[in-house]
Each structure stands twice: as C-alpha cells, then as structure tokens.
C-alpha cells in the first residue's frame, strides 16, 4: 500500500493521507461479488478510464473522455459485451451513462471483472458522485463532487483502488 493508493474502508476513503467521506454499496463490502447484490467488491482494483459530461463540467484531466447521449454500460450477464462500454441502441440490459441526475457527470472506471468479464460476477463498479452524503450505492464508490474531482485529478490510469474487507 502506498500513499497514492485510494484505500476504501468501512469508515471512508484515504488518499495521500487525507480522509474522504464516501458511500459504498447498500449491502456493504463482499468478497463474493455477484450481479445485482448491491455490494462493493473487496479487492485490489485499478483505474482504467475517466468519463465526464462536457455539457456540465470542463474536462477534468487530459485523459478524460466525454460521455455522449448514446453511451451505455452493459450490465446484462447474457450480453456478449457484459461489463463493457456499449452504444445505443443496445438490446441487452444496460446502464445509461448520460443521466438526468449528476451521479455520472464524472465517472472513474475500474477493472472489476474487466476486460475479460465473467457473466454474473458484477459490472459497472465505478467511482462517481453520491446522491447525498453517504447514501448507499448499488456497489460503486461514491463521493461528494469536489472530492470526486480531486480523486480524478490525483489518480491516473493504472492507479490502485484498494477496497478493504
């Protein structure tokens, strides 16, 4: 573990020695993650991408990619593109990345069950903005907007997100 790792515990997150309040899955953390369980997976994840809404915020880093109106994320275990970025129209179950609310205005992607996804082992484990302070997620890690921007600007691709048991 290094100071540059984002460490997520039951009491919050830590980055460069600073504590950040965060929210995790409604079912807590799990070492046996599966699709739809509402748990945040325990383990050593890596940051693989950064998406943002260019109509709502400036590009937070040079490597951030804009979210467009047709951008989706497959969460259907029957989909050959399960746990991957896909585009509308898409006939399998998915999450819309361009949401009406601000939760996905800025999204850090992780390598949970990616790129070689095992169907049913969980999808779309993102770092994103929280709905309200510490309000549980469906398995993602959520932060206040200002903290999320700081995390995004501090963690380049390949950075570790350590989710503690």
Image: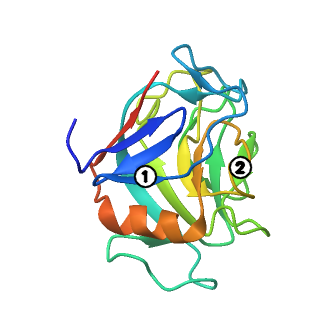
In the rendered view, would you say 114 is above or below 70?
Answer: above
Residue at disc 2, secondary structure: strand
**What is the distance, in whole Å, between disc 2 and disc 1 at their CAs?**
30 Å
**In the rendering, at what x and y percent does residue 19 appear?**
43, 52
**In the rendering, at what x and y percent does residue 7 appear?**
38, 40
**In the rendering, at what x and y percent does residue 62 appear?**
32, 77
**In the rendering, at what x and y percent does residue 96 appear?**
72, 56
Q: In the figure, is residue 162 to the left or right of 142? A: left
In the rendered view, would you say 119 is above or below 115?
Answer: above
When asked about the image quadrant of residue 114, the answer is top left
Are the residues flagged by discs 2 and 1 in contact, CB closer than 8 Å? Answer: no
Pointer 2: what residue?
Answer: 95
Q: Front-most of 14 and 150?
A: 14
Q: Front-most of 90 and 52?
A: 52
Residue at 56% in and 38% down = 83
In the rendered view, would you say 134 is above or below 43?
Answer: below
- Within 10 angstroms of label 2, few (less than 14), some, or many (20 or more) residues? some
The residue furthest top is 32
When asked about the image quadrant of residue 36, the answer is top right
When asked about the image quadrant of residue 77, the answer is top right
Q: Nearer the viewer, mark 2 or mark 1?
A: 1
Residue at 46% in and 33% down = 112
Q: In the figure, is residue 156 to the left or right of 121? A: left
Q: In the rendered image, which quarter contains the N terminus?
A: top left
Dot 2 or dot 1: first in sequence order is: 1
Pointer 1: what residue?
Answer: 19
Residue at 74% in and 39% down = 92
Residue at 71% in and 23% down = 37
For residue 1, the mark is none
Residue at disc 1, secondary structure: strand
Q: How many marks?
A: 2
The residue furthest left is 2
């Amino acid at each position: 573990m290094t100071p540059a790792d984002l460490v997520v515990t039951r009491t919050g997150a830590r980055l460069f020695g600073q504590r950040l309040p965060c929210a995790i899955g409604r079912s807590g953390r799990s070492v046996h993650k599966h699709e739809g369980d509402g748990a945040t997976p325990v383990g050593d994840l890596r940051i693989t991408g950064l998406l943002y809404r260019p109509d709502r915020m400036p590009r937070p880093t040079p490597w951030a990619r804009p979210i467009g109106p047709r951008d989706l994320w497959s969460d259907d275990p029957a989909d050959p593109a399960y746990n991957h970025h896909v585009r509308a129209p898409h006939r399998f179950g998915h999450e819309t990345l361009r949401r009406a609310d601000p939760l996905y205005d800025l999204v850090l992607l992780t390598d949970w069950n990616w790129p070689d996804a095992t169907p049913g082992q969980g999808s779309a484990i993102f770092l994103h903005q929280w709905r309200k302070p510490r309000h549980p997620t469906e398995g993602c890690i959520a932060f206040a907007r200002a903290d999320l921007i700081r995390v995004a600007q501090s963690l380049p691709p390949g950075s570790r997100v350590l989710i503690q048991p």
